[in-house]
Image (cartoon, rainbow, N blue to C red):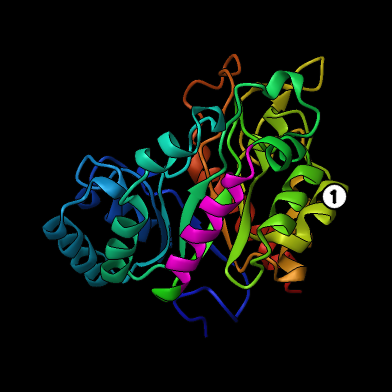
Amino acid sequence: MTDRHGKGGGVRLTMLSDMAGRDLAESLPKLRAWGLDLLDLKGGLFGKGVLDLTDDEAARAASMLRDAGVEVYCLSTQLFHSQVEIGEAAFRAKYAGGVDRAIQLAEVLQPRFIRLLAADTSRRAELDDAVAYIAAEQPWVFDAYREAAERIAAAGFETTIENEIGGCIFSRPEEVVAFFDALGRPDRTCFTWDVQNLWQMGTFPSVEVYEALQPVTGYVHVKGGIAGADGGLEFRSTLRDASWPVEEIVGRVAASGVSPVVCLNWPHGGTRPGRENEDIIAEDLAYVRELLTESRT
């Protein structure tokens, strides 16, 4: 048996809610047809993102999910996705009330995690170690995340922090691990490793990268991608066709139990010639299920 937090009974699968449609009335039948009973709530919620839901809409969503037999694993908010150079006062003002609102929604929707995003830096291109820069010049960033994690924990939920692309402060495993070490809240926070996002930040996914991140990781997001001549991401693809070692990494994730739930994401990149109508979701679901079944035998 598995509980609503995905613990026990092997690794479960989920996907971002907006992958199935713009409205729960459209997406829930698809999810059940795909054999999914767990959802990462981000968008596609009555045409809204998760933090834009009204109280009535949140209650309606909870009722619809319950009737469909679908549990919520994570509330994927966009909180804290700003450049640290805007300064502490502006950063805190921008997200004032956001964490409290996420907690209010979580009390209705009952996820395990509330997701925050890793912040950006306008100096990303010149920095080899953005976390060392934050520690030296923007130390309030750690306080902002700590305070949010404490409030989320006090409400009975857990905080996960996901890496993004562009100016993200996470580009290498060393930065990720150093950030979570500086937070000093291992019982309240974990890393959501979006495999392709870190690749787009310059770190190609490998077993060695997984092992470096494993101590702080609690949730893994996977999506395909074909490398170009320079090793960077060029085309979107299914996971089966991806350039990175999906089988090895998913196998390690399943064997370790570090991420009791694996989340499918839409892949980034251009469209490969002749693959315009590729059914990535169905193929990825089948492939990851195959890998997880093999990991249990």
Measuring from the top left, give residue 234's x and y in whole percent. 67, 19
As for residue 213 lying within the magenta part, the answer is no
What is the three-letter code of the residue carrying label 1?
Val
Q: Is residue 107 left or right of residue 239?
A: left
The residue drawn where x is 49% and y is 43% is 281
Q: Quadrant of residue 44?
A: top left
Q: Which residue is mark 1?
A: 207
Q: Which residue extends farthest right?
A: 208
Q: Nearer the viewer, residue 244 or 104?
A: 104
Measuring from the top left, give residue 223's x and y in whole percent. 61, 40
Measuring from the top left, give residue 45's x and y in whole percent. 25, 47
The residue drawn where x is 84% and y is 56% is 211
Where, quadrant-wise, is the C terminus in this rendering? bottom right
Q: Is residue 34 left or right of residue 48?
A: right
Q: Is residue 258 left or right of residue 88?
A: right
- Identify the secondary structure beneath mark 1: helix
Q: Which residue extends farthest bottom?
A: 1
Q: Is residue 98 visible?
A: yes
As for residue 149 lying within the magenta part, the answer is yes
Q: Which residues are magenta?
A: 138-153
The residue drawn where x is 62% and y is 33% is 168
